[in-house]
Amino acid sequence: MTAEPTPTVAADGSGDVLRVEHISKRFGAVRALNDVNLHLVQGEVLGLLGDNGAGKSTLIKIMCGFQIPTAGRIVLEGQEITLKSVDHARSLGIDTVFQDLALINELTVYHNMFLNRERTRFSLLNNRSMRRTAKEQLERIGVDLPSVDAEVAKLSGGQRQAIAVARAVTSNAKVLLLDEPLAAMGAKEGAMILELVKDLKRQGQVSIIMIMHNYGQALEVCDRINLLQHGEITFDKLAKDTSVQELNDIVIEEYRRALAEREKSA
């Protein structure tokens, strides 16, 4: 099998589709993010790792327009943007799949694919058009489902996650933010989502940031790894240049420092 090329960025950052520069976020006296700098290369999959409370979700919420940063800026395809809402971010090409997926269980697959952007004809839902297009789009990006007529409630967690990802991709997203897409999934369903991300990477349709906890899975699917600790990016390496052992050693050292500080202050 031929190895997939790793996306590269020019020294001037011209290969970046998205950059966040000097992003900070305060909630009262609490600093959730501290001068975060992150960039996403066109066509790459970036793994954003970190312990609970490190600031990953806050950073994703800022990049998708859900929260406003206290300081810093966001640059999309070379242009500075000020995100006003999640819908505004989506209109610019930044789409997010949150853990709750925002799917309606009682609706069919194809109705969920067109949720809030339904097609109509003579003021009525054009179900035939939506059904045909949903089937074509799911097949195009390699999502295998029993039927687009199936109710989402009857599908597995992995299949529901795939629908949410497919909906974002087929809405012409340039940047896709995946918030813990493998959370609470078994090995089989997790492998299905990893394969979907690999297919998207091969097709080069969208650049992806994935919040993840499993280092092995992150190294398998991501081109580059960022580690967020205490609201700061402390690690940025190509996946091929690091290992589970190195990532574990960094986190273990963090725990040791925290324990030592606690014992000193006791």
Image (cartoon, rainbow, N blue to C red):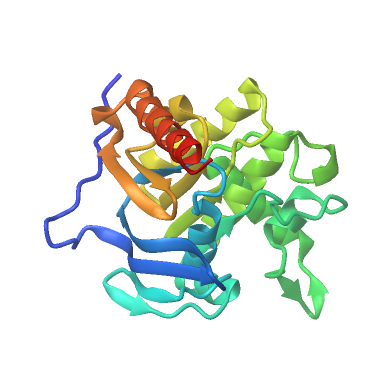
214 horizontally vs 46: left or right: right
Residue drawn at x 59%, y 41% is 181
Residue drawn at x 81%, y 50% is 108
Pick the residue in front: 91 or 241: 241
Q: Quadrant of residue 35?
A: bottom left
Q: Residue furthest top?
A: 1
Residue 193, image x and y in percent? Answer: 57, 34
Residue 94, image x and y in percent? Answer: 48, 64
Residue drawn at x 32%, y 63% is 19
On-image quarter of the N terminus: top left
Pick the residue in front: 2 or 147: 2
Residue 188, image x and y in percent? Answer: 63, 22
Q: Quadrant of residue 185?
A: top right
Residue 152, image x and y in percent? Answer: 80, 45
Q: How many marks?
A: 0
Q: Residue furthest right?
A: 106
Pick the residue in front: 266 or 195: 266
Pick the residue in front: 222 or 207: 222
Q: Quadrant of residue 88?
A: bottom right
Vertical position of residue 44 compared to residue 24: above or below: above
70 horizontally vs 57: left or right: left
Vertical position of residue 69 compared to residue 200: above or below: below
Vertical position of residue 36 compared to residue 105: above or below: below
